[in-house]
Amino acid sequence: MTSANPYTDTLSVAQQQYRIYSLSKAAERFGDISRLPFSLKVLLENLLRHLDGDSVTDADIQALVDWQKTGSSEREIAFRPARVLMQDFTGVPAVVDLAAMRAAVAALGEDPDKVNPLSPVDLVIDHSVMVDRYASADAFSENVNIEMQRNYERYAFLRWGAKAFANFRVVPPGTGICHQVNLEYLGQTVWAEHTEDCQLAYPDTLVGTDSHTTMINALGILGWGVGGIEAEAAMLGQPVSMTIPQVVGVELTGRLAAGITATDLVLTVTQLLRKHGVVGKFVEFFGAGLAQLSLADRATIANMAPEYGATCGFFPVDQITLDYLKLTGRDGAVISRVKAYCQAQGLWREDSDEPGFTDKLHLDLATVEASLAGPKRPQDKVTLTQLKQHCDDTKPLDSKTQAREAELVSEGGGQSKAATTDNSFDLNGSRIKLPEHAVVIAAITSCTNTSNPSVLMAAGLLAKNALAKGLQAKPWVKCSLAPGSKVVSRYLQQAGLMSALEQVGFYLVGYGCTTCIGNSGPLAKPIAEAINKGDLNVSAVLSGNRNFEGRIHPLVKSNWLASPPLVVAFALAGRMNIDLSAEPIGQDAQGNDVYLKDIWPDNDRVAAAVATVQSSMFSAEYDKVFDGDASWQAIEVAKAKTYSWPDSSYIRQPDFFRGLSRKPKPVRDIVNARVLAILGDSVTTDHISPAGNIKQSSPAGEYLQQLGIAPEDFNSYGSRRGNHEVMVRGTFANVRIRNEMLPGSEGGVTRHYPSGDTLPIFAAAMRYQQQELPLIVIAGKEYGTGSSRDWAAKGTLMLGVRAVLAESFERIHRSNLIGMGVLPLQFLPGTDRKTLKLTGEESFTLRGLSELTAKQKLQLLIRYADGGKQEIDVHCRIDTATELAYYQHGGILHYVLRRMIGAA
């Protein structure tokens, strides 16, 4: 990667000379690239810049150019992102691993400074704040104080990391959500780097430890979510190994109708693309309709790429991109560089552009309707007019399930009694009856929508109109406002709308993900007791991107995604089984019916409010973004190469690298493995990974109590990701997970064989470890969908699982399993857990792993409890030679660490 590279050229921008790696010069050598999708052109430049004849060859570049012939390729390439983005839940264990790697290097007599990020890393603390306080002007300050007290040990550790590691920055708590901070400040679209002999310009690219990293694709920045393990390797200089993806083009035409929001649009796009099937593919948007979408609208669509299943949802650079860079306070030199570079490299979009794609879809924006998604999956769109019927059609649970769920999720006063129809409770001196389908949580939250001024202004205007009609949120609704950045508060206040939101119930509670990741905080005790007594199907409505069961709150069975103004509307209505297009949302002071149409703001008023957003607001908030408040600055830590591991229940030195050898040991065969769990379709990382509240009676809760920690101080699983003892006990412990080894059961339980004992999954796994028996997990389709969570793989490994056999895998989780040394195996078509009549009593043997190759078919021997045997072929889902090397070393970090000390 020197000036001798034949594809270099010079670009002059405002008297500044840049070296670039010219796509037009590459075209002269490898063939025309004019119809290559923009996203693949970014990959092409990445290959040109890192062409070394080893990790990147001419054949790799030719394969990418030749992709245009068929729209697909099996070629494996090495992608090197410019930077890495982390949030604190996934970032803390990554920094813990780095600290442990330094300890391992020191134990081998090497310099710990050899372990350092080689690519820039930004970690934004955004996942820790919880909605403990709400509905008051003091809610924000009180939640910040509680957050700091709960997480002091974690934050002190991150402060140490910011001082100890090069190329590592931390955005303190109370600042914003990582994806919005990335969009509004960190992202550059075209990067400039001073090298030894020149200024180098190249596309801004990244990977992130959160699946919604895809949001940045709205700025023409190619990036997506990877597992924390894979991200650690990327920041330590390892390329992301990937197959050249298929690219699905989505043509947008027309314009959105009056009153239709970007949220309605993204829910429509999500349903459309889920139906088409884009898992593992790039999605790229084109067409004249793009000119009708603001950058924030594009960001809303790009954000939810994980929900429609794609690796990313890419928007090429155009004038709207430049306008947003200017609005958000980017330097003029950066904006000039972006325009000149993209135009010179063929990365500038025009309405008439139509690249060649693997497949094409079309969406007329005018056909989008007001919508929600739920009650369990983001791709399950329900139009506003269909919602009431959908709720009314919901069948009640049978009595056994009711009793079991009431016991599983009892909150406030111990286990619930038998279900009763008395749903009344006393609240603030009034006797209230909680209705079925009551909205008990209404949250304006998450990165998806709080980056978009149009929907936030619409929410504020709707609140203002509702106040004028005398409407307020129902008393049983827990309302919260958690913007993605402090800029949001500035422009809501500037537009005079913050006060209106507060008066209807939506007070500022923090700057972070909050409800969308399960940090919704407790419900008022009388409400919680009423839900338990009546075993009610109550609802949460949030402007987020995730609504998987058990995620938002353990007492809430139905979770709905909606735009911020609809979140306010349903808080006013207080229930979900209502047709807001035809039924009144409430009554005014004179008893007259008020309908949603009476308070819904028109487009002109929304546009006028959005026009008040100024560049100076962004500049003011991001001027000292890394400084933090007084409590953050007061955290004192010693600057040292290695971490002095304290006696902490939050941060503990993991066992992954203890006793690390310089050379890897041969991979052992899997012999007589027992089944830890048999799981169905669409098992998410929310089901697998520890997340949300820690239940008192759970293995993790019992462990914390043994340390002398009271249940009220448990905090969440996410906040304790730096303690492997907590996390392994919470793996497969979700209250909604269903293990088919125990038909009709829910929760993290399994059956141990041959004893037949029913045990928590952790307890069973520990018993198998004492017996020195390996474990296997059996699953259905789409195993591991959802957020990219490293502990879904780490916890699986620590439980003793050697392999996961599923009908299909989600991309990130499959990669993470390999990254931790767990073998992903896939059933061949026509074979699954049902055709094999698996009950969990079987044992499994897989041999020949020391000679394993990528994409190999393997023979799996199944021994049944009655003495019968069956041998089946399974597909090894180690897809590339690089992944195979990771697996043979025991994981990606072991491989990287050995390379850093010259042992691999």
Image: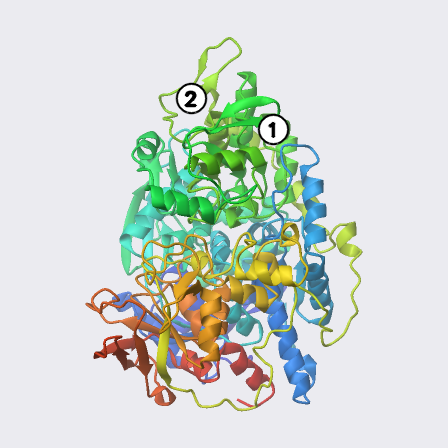
Q: In the rendered image, which quarter is residue 68 located in?
A: bottom left
Q: Secondary structure at mark 2?
A: helix
Please state which amino acid type lies under the numbered disc 1.
Answer: Leu
**Which residue appears at 64% of the width and 63% of the height?**
706
Q: Is residue 625 left or right of residue 904?
A: right
Residue denoted by label 1 = 497
Res 58 seen here: yes
Give the image location of residue 642, x and y in percent. Answer: 72, 76
Residue situated in front as seen by the camera: 56 or 667:
667
The colour scheme used to paint the residues is rainbow
Within 10 Å of disc 2 (Cα), the crowding (few <14, some 14-19, many 20+) is some
Res 30 seen here: no
Residue situated in front as seen by the camera: 670 or 206:
670
Q: Secondary structure at mark 1?
A: loop
- The outermost residue toward the top is 590
Residue situated in front as seen by the camera: 562 or 290:
562
Q: Going from the N terminus, do you reach mark 1 or mark 2 first? A: 1
Query: Where is 491 relative to 161, above or below?
Result: above
Give the image location of residue 576, x and y in percent. Answer: 41, 31
Residue denoted by label 2 = 597
Please state which amino acid type lies under the numbered disc 2.
Answer: Lys
Do the numbered discs 1 and 2 sit on residues whose CB atoms are within 8 Å?
no
